[in-house]
Image (cartoon, grey):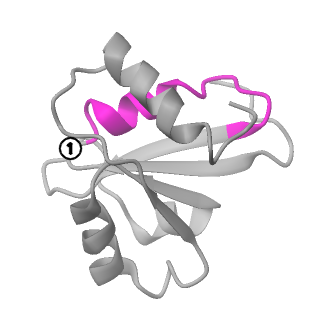
Amino acid sequence: MPTVPPNATQLLFICSQNRWRSLTAERLFDDHATYEARSAGTEPGARVRVTAGHIGWADVVFVMERKHADLLQAKFSEELANKTIINLRIPDKFQFLDAVLQELLRERLQPHLPLL
């Protein structure tokens, strides 16, 4: 189990199935000194399906596509009231831990997470 740094910024990554994009994003932060990450999916068959608890836990929510933000807003509008949602605009065309996906995630996250 990774060690969680005290006062870590809690990041939640959302995609459809929580198998490739959001799970890869979560793995980028394993044992990070400043950020703690979790991931979930919006679809019924997701590896881990997003819940109100995930939203409540997160300081910042990152989605891979606009449809994910729309689904979250429709289902968890109250929990998202004071949360920042950032759309990374990453299409569903990558496999888990794909090198191109990892580089794209780092590029898209850098403006929002300077300590990446």
Q: Position of residue 27 (x, y in %)?
A: 49, 25
In-image side of 85 versus 20 (left or right):
right
Whether residue 24 is visible: yes
Task: From the viewer's side, name the closer residue of 114 and 15.
Answer: 114
Q: Position of residue 79 (x, y in %)?
A: 50, 80
Name the image quarter holding residue 21.
top left
Q: Compared to 69, does 36 lie above or below?
A: above
Tag 1: Cα neighbours inside 10 Å, few (<14), some, or many (≥20)?
Answer: many
Q: Amino acid at mark 1?
A: Gln
Magenta residue span: 18-35
Q: Residue beneath label 1, please?
A: 17
The furthest residue to the top: 99
Task: Identify the residue shown where x is 54% and y is 24%.
Answer: 28
Residue 26: say if magenta: yes
Image quadrant containing the C terminus: top right
Task: Identify the residue shown where x is 51% and y is 43%.
Answer: 38
Image quadrant containing the N terminus: top right
Task: From the viewer's side, name the closer residue of 73 and 102.
Answer: 102
Q: Compared to 71, does 2 lie above or below?
A: above
